[in-house]
Image (tube, rainbow, N blue to C red):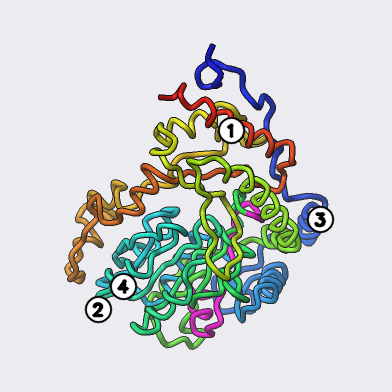
Amino acid sequence: MKKLAINGGQKIKTELFPEYVTVGQEEIKAVERVIKSGKLSRFLGVWHEDFYGGEEIRKLESEWAEYFNVKHAIAVNSATSGLYCAVGASGAGPGDEVIVSPFTMTASATAALVYNAIPVFADIEEDYFCLDPNSIEERLTERTKAIIVVDIFGQPYDAERINAIAKKHNLIVIEDAAQAPGAKYKDKFAGTLGDIGVFSLNYHKHIHCGEGSLVVTDNDELADKIRLIRNHAEAVVEAKGYSSLVNMLGFNYRMTELEAAVAREQLKKLNGLLDKRLENVEYLCNELSKIPCLKIGKVRKNCKHAFYDLPIKFDKKIAGVFRDKFVNAIASELMPFKLRENEGVAIGSGYVKPLYLEPMYQNLIAYGDKGCPFKCTMYKGELNYSKGICPVTERMHYEELFSMEFMLPSMTKNDMDDVIRAFNKVWENREELI
């Protein structure tokens, strides 16, 4: 008789995992306060006192800047918008290149395309999965304008080496810290390690307000540009007396007062939620590291990881089966989270397909049907989006890496014990998968 659930055996877990809900009475009261004020948004897209938003926006920005010990925090409606603002503020444009990660959510790369700059993909690190400084150096050209680093899974990027490369070549470092609120490199928070940092308040993240983002910087000029791009820059520069028109085509990236009020309450909860997440990671890793074919993702020296996901490397030679079969068997033993039933069990092989293999890059079509900006006459570089340009990324995605969310703060010890039992069951009965 088969023992594994994937083959018809009995599942380890038959009830849904507990929902991860961070909103409560505090957020309800905050929303009620805003509703009663009648001011759900205070932004005006002209040079006016309300160009910078209303009371909740300004308080959120002040509180976020204080928490993360940074000079400027600018609220926008999503981390995607925040990345677009950051690239715009960097001055990148047609003919320029921006070095990006292929192992991340797509907006971390398309942010360059918004300004008709060309994304150049560098490879990731073997152990930490962030951009590899050596690969960045190999991709540098006279056209390079900025580097978008990603604190993937909550791991801070190699700030010391990459910042040094950027300084040497006069490049802007944009840090995508969407998955890393509260993470640290030495005594500095992730998100504050580069020239511009972008946090996410999307509902999947550590804390959230539905959709939203804070963009942070210590640079006054960059902060000014980000605020302008956020709110119809082209309509404001003349009245504001702003002389540079580079990338001053603005957008509506404004956060509402309702979202800001919720985000203010969520920020107060970050420390406790992160502590619980780290506690759960430690418990899971102590047990899962005993399984010979698994290698828990490393934490960079002098860093505090935020563990948006728990990444694990799989050794098929030791296991005797392919990663995907093993991971699918684990998933069959477990259940989804409440409120996320339609997403399936929170474990998956790889992460994202290397971005350069997506149709847009393979077909060189973004704006219109003429191949812009890839075939723009202002671009003098040589494009290479072929398979094999980032071998570590491809190996991690297609063969070795998997990740899971069973360290969420809502998970109890009993819940995590079910996860551990599922892993041990599949390991001990892996011959059923051969």
| SS type, badge 3 | helix
Q: Residues within 10 Å of mark 3 (few under 14, many from 20)?
A: some
- The residue positioned 33% from the left and 82% from the top of the image is 169
Disc 2 from disc 3: Cα separation:
51 Å
| SS type, badge 4 | helix
Mark 4 — residue? 137
Please indicate whether residue 29 sits to the left or right of residue 284 in the image. right
Mark 3 — residue? 26
> Is 232 drawn above or below residue 142 in the view shown?
above
> Is 214 drawn above or below residue 407 in the view shown?
below
Which label lies toward us, 2 or 4?
Answer: 4
Q: Amino acid at mark 3?
A: Glu
**In the depicted view, which residue is nearer to us: 343 or 311?**
311
Mark 2 — residue? 142
Q: In the image, residue 292 lies at what x, y percent?
A: 51, 41
> Is 434 drawn above or below residue 65 in the view shown?
above
